[in-house]
Amino acid sequence: MEQQTHTRGFGFYLKIVIGLALAGFIVGVLSGSITWFSEDTPIMIINDMDDQFKVKPQVGSTFYTDRKSGREPLPNTVPIEGSAYPLDKPDFDKADSLIGANPLDISTPEKRQYILSRGKNRYEAFCTPCHNYDGQGNGAVVSRGFQNPPNLRDEVTKAKTDAHLFHIISAGQNIMNGYADKIKPNDRWSIVHYVREMQKLGVK
Ligand code: HEC
């Protein structure tokens, strides 16, 4: 008896491949992975918490009428850690008598290394967008039109006392906002040390 061989033609496999591709495509469109045709909210089979009622950075909030996502703290709110900064922006002249010297001692190599690396870390997190990594201005937001801040390494800033620098970091100066509510006092002082280090490099 003749053995019956069962060979499936090329057409059969082609149909399977096309069928699978089509099925994948449909699933892709419905699940929102393929967004070529529609910006509509996709059908979420497994939502993975993709859609949440939450505020996202740099996006206006529709919840509050002022469109800000965060609320301003009530007047006289004190941070959980630390204390409120006692001076306001224009109180520059009171800083020397009220704030005094930098309390962070960097006289030993260990302390120096520890405090300066902390200052560098905080400076780079908070100040570089405007003052840049080298302290000379032209940070990333300046290239997008923000006012270029003064060169922190020039004589004008160098001549300011530690208390004055601490005051500017805490309360701000003109269009620069204060960081008293964002950076802890000791971290602000470590930034002052770090700015002093950068100043030793002079203006380049
Ligand atoms: C959003 C941009 C921005 C950020 C972020 C910023 N600054 Fe400033 N800073 C400025 C501008 C602009 C000025 C100049 C303000 C003026 O016109 O007096 C300034 C001024 C200063 C001055 C005074 C310089 C002088 O001699 O007059 C110091 C010191 C200073 N900033 C330190 C810092 C430190 C330290 C940080 C980080 C904790 C920081 N700034 C974060 C924009 C910024």
Image (spheres, rainbow, N blue to C red):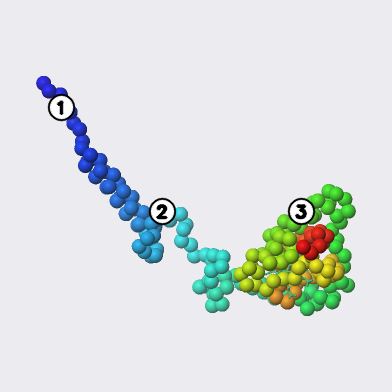
Indicate if the residue with disc 2 has its beta carbon within 8 Å of ligand 1.
Answer: no
Kindly state the secondary structure of the residue where label 1 is placed.
loop
> Taking 11 as reference, is 197 above or below it?
below
Identified by mark 3, the residue type is Ser
Residue under the image location 57 percent in, 73 percent down: 68
Looking at the rendered image, the quarter that the N terminus falls into is top left
Question: In the picture shown, does residue 85 fall above or below 34?
Answer: below
Q: Position of residue 101 (x, y in %)?
A: 87, 65
Disc number for residue 125: none
Q: Which residue is mark 3?
A: 117
In this view, the residue in front, 116 or 50, is 116
User: Ligand 1 lies in which image quarter?
Assistant: bottom right
Instruction: Single out the residue that lies furthest toward the top.
Output: 1
Label 2 close to label 1 by CB (< 8 Å): no
Observer able to see residue 200: yes
| Residue that badge 2 annotates | 46
Res 70 quadrant in image: bottom right
**Which residue is at 56% across, 77% downward?**
66
Quarter of the image for residue 105 reads bottom right
Q: Are marks 3 and 1 in contact (CB under 8 Å)?
A: no
Which label number is shown at residue 4? 1
The C terminus - image quarter: bottom right
Tell me which label, 3 or 2, sits earlier in the chain: 2
Q: SS at mark 3?
A: helix
